[in-house]
Each structure stands twice: as structure tokens, then as C-alpha cells.
Amino acid sequence: MEGVYRYVLTDVQRAVWTDSWGVDEETLPLGAGAKWCVRKTTLRGGPQDGVDLIEVDNGAFSFFVVPTRGMGIWKGIYRGIPLGWESPVRDLVNPAFVDPNDRGGLGWLKGFNEWIVRCGLNSNGAPTTDVVIDNNGNKTEVFLPLHGNIANIPARQVEIRVQLTAPNTITVVGIVEETMMFGPALRLTTFITTELESNRISISDHVTNLGSAPSEMQLLYHCNYGPPLLEAGASLAAPFKTVSPRDGRAQEDIGSFDRFGAPRQGYVEQVYFYELLGKRGSRETSVLLKNKDGNLGSTLQFSLKQLPGFSLWKNTAATENGYVTGLEPATNYPNAKPFEREQGRVPVLGRNETKRFDLNISVHDSRKSVLASEKQIKQIQKNGKPRISDRPLDRISG
């Protein structure tokens, strides 16, 4: 590509792999005046042994991409503001140490500590059994563990791209494949992009069916926040048609579904399902997590044409147990896959078909910036009257 610097870090097909590497404004001057860098390292020791880690610093916003863990984003820092959370899982766990079937299908949680992690691609919800056609053409029952497999599959190809002309952008490109004989054959091609000195990351994911027959797919972005954005008095702003509790536990606090408390020992998670509103025509929407004082926040922007489901996961447990909330745009709600299929919320890809999913994450470090995001959300809210259900909705909660 003309005007683009490219460096391949991993290419399994060509037997290319780089242990450590870096580029910055001194080795690749862009003339923009910003101090930026991209660095690749390989972690050693303990459960993180062999994990590839890529740091991207645009001069104001730095974040860490983890090719070994499905191209998830571990942590971020914007002008000193930490993004992510403190999980009881302290290390970036090599997928070799994660058994997804552990503890009745909850083994995914043994590696769960990222700021942004994908759930999918074959399934993304609660552990369940499903019925598929096996290699002999017979119906057979299979077990689907929590949140699927993509977060624990290493990328087979990773490339860095730097735009040499304005606007100067840095992109991490990765390819991850979830494939098996007589089973799903799905490819994720991701482009994680940021512009020099910006407050934003853009994720553009392309999911392709590599098989010869139609294939189901599911995708959920588990975007997780702890302090300082999450604190007692923090809140979520979102334009919605309906909000409903997932279950009886969430039903207990429906009156404060969009507000957060301080860390509390013994807290049991609560999940709320949203039917969001979007802008007329484009169906673009956004949600905002802001701290108590309204001077720190983070906005997710996405299209309801691509990601019509949205869930709010509240886990304001004791700090040691993972004080965190998850904002979760998705193709569906994270119920058992058979239920979501019955409701028509499981996308199907035709032979060689590709679906695109875009997610933009912005960070706000001033009251003015937070208010501007809130204003956009209030404008979208004018497209419909919000309704809060005090009990689970049959068509949404499985």
C-alpha cells in the first residue's frame, strides 16, 4: 500500500514469527510532532509464558493487544487514566492453561482479565448443550462452554501498519481462525486502529465463513471497566426502547439498573438487557459510562444493524473478587444459543460470506467532553420513549 509502513510480526503460513520488535518516531519520523511507538514482546514465566503482547502508544493513548488471546485488548491508559480492571486472574494466561469445559463450562473465566475481549465465534452465551449434525449426518448433542473459543485461539497472522501521511494512524491487523474438521470454519480478521494523539480506538472485525455450507456465528464484545470510571455513584447513559432484568437477581435492583455501588463483599452479579435506539437512517448508537463527578467517561459507538443486542453486566463485588462492569454490544443476548436461535438472533453466514462489525471506543477526561457524549445520547433518545420492565421479558431472557 502506498504511503503505509508495514511490518509482519506473525505469519504461520510463511513460518514468520518475531520474538521482540519496535518502531517509533525516531526510527520512522511522521512529521506530526507526536511521540509514539509500537512494541512487541513475548512474555515469559508462569501462566503467561509464551504470550505475545503488542503495545501501541499514539502519544496520548496507549493500549495492549494480545495476539495469543484472540487479539483481545488487555489494558489501556489515556493521559494517565487506566482503562480495564483488576481481575483475580493476575496474568495474561496462555490459552494452553485454559480448559473451557472446567467447572461445568466456566473455564473461560480462568483467563478472563482483559479490558476488551471477544466472545464467539460459534457461540457466545451461557454454557449449554446444542444439537448439531455430525460427520455421519446424524443429529448429536454437543456442549457449548461459556462465551465460546475465540478469546483462547492465537492469531495465525499479525501485521503492523502505520499511515505515513495525515491522518497518521497505527493499525494492528490480526487473523484468528476457529476451525475444525466436520465443524465450524470461521475466520476473524480484525483491524484495531488509532490516530496519533487521539482519545479513540476503532475495532473493525470481519467474520468469514470458510466452509462450503451456511454456518451460524455469534459475536459479543465484553468491554470491562473498573476504577476510576467505575465507583460508587458512577452511571451508564444509553438511549433505549426497553431495559429488562435477565433474571430474578437482576430484578431485585431494577430501580437502580443504570447506577453503580461501591465494592461489596458477597455481591452476586446482575445483568440487564437493553433494546437500544439508534440514529434515524444509520441506526448508529452510543452508550456512556461516567464516574460520579462526570469528569471521566468512556463511550462505545456502534451500529445496531451490526450489533443489535446490548447487555450491562454489573459485578460490583469486593475489590479482591473483581470489581467490574461490562458493557456488551453483540449480535445477540448472551443466553443459551438454542434460545437465541429460536428468537431469530443467531446470524447465518453463507458460503464464503463475510459480515463486518465495527466498534469505536472513546475516552473522556473532562466534564465538557462527557457532557458532549451525553448530549448525543439524549438526542438519540428522542427517537423513542424508554420503558423499564420490572421483570424479565420472555422474548429476551432465556
Image (cartoon, rainbow, N blue to C red):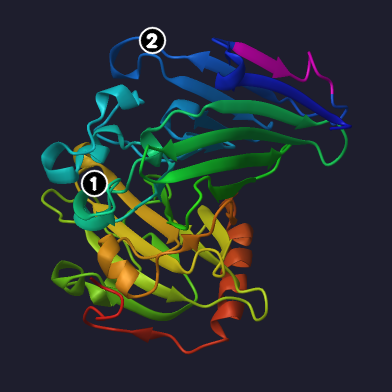
Q: Amino acid at mark 1?
A: Pro
Q: Is residue 388 left or right of residue 80?
A: left
Q: In front here: 118 or 90?
A: 118
Q: Residue 126 magenta-drawn?
A: no
The quadrant where residue 21 appears: top right
Q: Secondary structure at mark 1?
A: loop
The magenta span reads 21-29
Which sits earlier in the primary sequence, circle 1 or circle 2? 2
Mark 1 in CB contact with mark 2 (< 8 angstroms)? no
Q: Quadrant of the N terminus?
A: top right
Residue 115 appears in view: yes
The numbered disc on residue 44 is 2
Q: Amino acid at mark 2?
A: Arg
Q: Is residue 186 left or right of residue 339?
A: right
Furthest residue to the bottom?
Answer: 385
Residue 93 appears in view: no
The residue that label 1 is drawn on is 145
Please say if 103 is above or below 347: above
